[in-house]
Amino acid sequence: MSDLNQTPRGSRLHISFFGRRNVGKSSLINALTRQNTSIVSNIPGTTTDPVFKSMEILPLGPVVLIDTAGTDDAGELGLMRVEKTLEVLFKTDLVLVVVDPVIGIDDYEKEILNKARNRNVPVIVVVNKADIINKEIVESNYMPETDEQPVVIVSALTGQGIEQLKLTMIKNAPKDWTPPTIVGDLISPGDTVVLVVPIDLAAPKGRLILPQMQTIRDVLDNDAKALVVKERELKSALESLKEKPSLVITDSQAFLKVDADTPGDVKLTSFSILFARFKGDLKSLVKGVKAIEELVPGDKVLVAEACTHHRVEDDIGTVKIPRWLRQIVGGALEFEYSSGIQLPDNLKDYKLIVHCGGCMINRKEMLFRIEQANLAGVPIVNYGLLIAYIHGILKRALKPFNIEF
């Protein structure tokens, strides 16, 4: 099956497995998936860093399973591994705490349970290795102590309890883990949606970028028609339509031309603004736009991207956005850049965070990043909102969502 036909990682339920070294986390993942997904060994500490694996588990559907290092890892390197393990909670929708039936729930397990509860992440306690201990003893030891979350007794070795665990996972998975629709609530069946897709150096050869593909699919899933054009073909495409489209969606970098070529009575927005809502909190990010007006020369600005990619000439994050912001401020700004799985620790040092659309992370992680910025007292905005504001068309771009600026 082509990667283009697979559910993107950011739209999958993220399930994390926590527990001591050699408690059987990797074996449990293999039992759930009925595949040798994770490396299994009797040597403690075989899993050193979080391992992400996109899978299909029936009847749960598309998921990402996250195998973590043992929470009792020792030594300086071990403590670093534990820190990485705990960071996984920020992108987790469902936690499985795997427990050794002999050791039971001790400080290591309690730390995970408490951290998960504090983040309102549902937890299942999984007592593994049931094949080596009496079930009645396990139940008497664990049921009273873990009455705040379900307990399932399994054996990853024999398969005992695995089906019951799947049912428990379905029952306890968050009801709202699936992101909201990208565009479906803004259109009606039979509508025509025009999508403006510039083909530039940053576009993967032979493919459209992920937000464009997902938006097209969402248009079709909602029984509307998708007309895809490049920016220089938009005007003639609109003139050829018998009826006006219900919505025009553009790549943010083509905002100015698309705004000029789209009649004022046709709604217009961008892929990036759609994803500000789809992956995060649009209203919070709109508030961040106002901070642009308060920037002064010398302020520090963080440009954050959720993934790493090859930078091209006139790159949006490292070239265009810094240039536009300097022009608005009328002087030099100090820009720093981050990419990958987490934001830097020194968020309070910045006057503004400019974040990408977040297409490669799940909604839970994007919301956590917004929360991090809020706790640090730093305004955060995403690429599309900033570009619309700079070009003076933010009010128009927000009209489809009934949000005032």
Image (spheres, rainbow, N blue to C red):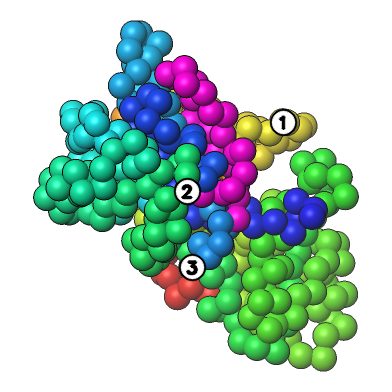
Q: In this orientation, which residue lies closer to the viewer: 307 or 112?
A: 112
Q: Residue at x 41, y 69 (%)?
A: 404
Q: Nearer the viewer, mark 3 or mark 1?
A: 3
Q: Nearer the viewer, mark 2 or mark 1?
A: 2
Q: Residues within 10 Å of mark 1 (few under 14, many from 20)?
A: few
Q: In this orientation, which residue lies closer to the viewer: 11 or 367?
A: 11
**Up-down relation of residue 346 to residue 399 (above or below):** above
Q: Earlier in the sequence, mark 2 or mark 3?
A: 2
Residue under pointer 2: 159
Image side of residue 29 versus residue 128, left or right: right
Amino acid, disc 1: Arg
Residue under pointer 3: 180
Residue at the left extreme of this rendering? 144
Q: In this orientation, which residue lies closer to the viewer: 259 or 122?
A: 122
**Residue 41 magenta-drawn?**
yes
**Residue 63 magenta-drawn?**
no
Q: In this orientation, which residue lies closer to the viewer: 320 or 4?
A: 4
Secondary structure category for the residue under label 3:
loop
Image side of residue 202 versus residue 168, left or right: right
Amino acid, disc 2: Gly
Q: Earlier in the sequence, mark 3 or mark 1?
A: 3
Q: Alpha-carbon distance for marks 3 and 1?
A: 30 Å
Residue under pointer 1: 311
